[in-house]
Image (cartoon, helix red, strand yellow):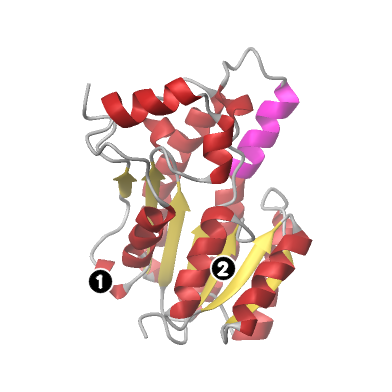
Amino acid sequence: MKFESRTALITGGAIGFGRAFARALVAEGASVVIADVDAEMAERTAAELVSAGGGAIAVDCDVADPDRVDAAVDAAIDRFGGVDIVINNAGLHLTKYNQPFGVLSRSEIRSLFDVNVMGVINTTLACRDSMRDRGGGVVLNISSMAGYLSATPYAVSKLTVRGLTVAFATELAPDRIRVNAIAPGLMNTENAIADLPRPLIHEFVHRLQLVHRLGKMDDIVSAMMFLCSDEASFITGETLKVSGGYPLNF
């Protein structure tokens, strides 16, 4: 199996992309740590994976809190011996954060950056020693196509994730740790579709994209599986757009 004997720590792993990542990795032999602020849902996801024959634990973790991130890494080390793959998936992303900076309160902006930016920093640094001690590893950050527009607090936070991807790829290279990111476009997920007006969805799919369909969960999962695997061993510091050709078709 492609990820046999490896352990992946997935932030925001209880639902959505995080849960899909966990299922795919476990199917290829990995053990997973489901780190999420929704402790009950994290437990349910971990139990599902265990019942299917996989290795999984759930950890109540707020990525904005370095102490709780350290505790999640300690749990991974105690249960599975260490961490080989980190997926920085946790993030705040609703339409609320796609408004101008002047519309949101300072506390809302701070909360957004605490999760979307400091969460990546906290988790990556917390896992560094374990990955290095195990001979290297992989960090995968979840950015967004919004980060290429950079006109709202959310977009700027995802632009920063792209910058962190380059910075950590450089800093962690001596430890044999590769760092890449995925920038999803408009995806057919329950949260995204419920949060966006229909005319905007139609505009994206039929005018702004080159591939005229909504993105699927499997599109992102496939990209994750490649970037986290040895097949991508010569790739680091990159952000892979998975967006149906957006924003090329202007």
Q: Name the residue beneath numbered marker 2.
A: 9
> Residue visible at 61% across and 57% down?
15
Apparent side of residue 239 relative to residue 121 in the rendered image (left or right): left
How many tags in the picture?
A: 2
* Residue 178 placement (x, y as % from top left): 36, 63
In the depicted structure, whether residue 219 falls above or below residue 95: below
* Residue 212 placement (x, y as % from top left): 27, 36
Magenta stretch, residue numbers = 106-117
Q: Is residue 125 visible?
A: no
Asked whether 121 or 52 is in front, the reply is: 52
> For residue 75, which quarter of the picture?
bottom right
> Residue visible at 32% across and 52% down?
237
Q: Quadrant of the C terminus?
A: top left
> Residue visible at 28% across and 40% down?
244
Q: Name the residue beneath numbered marker 1.
A: 231
Asked whether 120 or 135 is in front, the reply is: 120
Task: Find out whether residue 161 is within the magenta segment.
Answer: no
Residue furthest top in the image: 102
Apparent side of residue 249 relative to residue 40 in the rendered image (left or right): left
Rate crowding at label 1 as few (under 14), some (14 to 19) or many (20 or more) other CA atoms within 10 Å. Answer: few
Which mark sits nearer the N-terminus, 1 or 2?
2
In the depicted structure, whether residue 168 falls above or below residue 79: above
Rate crowding at label 2 as few (under 14), some (14 to 19) or many (20 or more) other CA atoms within 10 Å. Answer: many
- Helix, strand, or loop for circle 2? strand
Apparent side of residue 173 relative to residue 55 in the rendered image (left or right): left
Q: Which mark is residue 211?
A: none
* Residue 222 placement (x, y as % from top left): 34, 62
Identified by mark 1, the residue type is Glu
* Residue 201 placement (x, y as % from top left): 42, 28
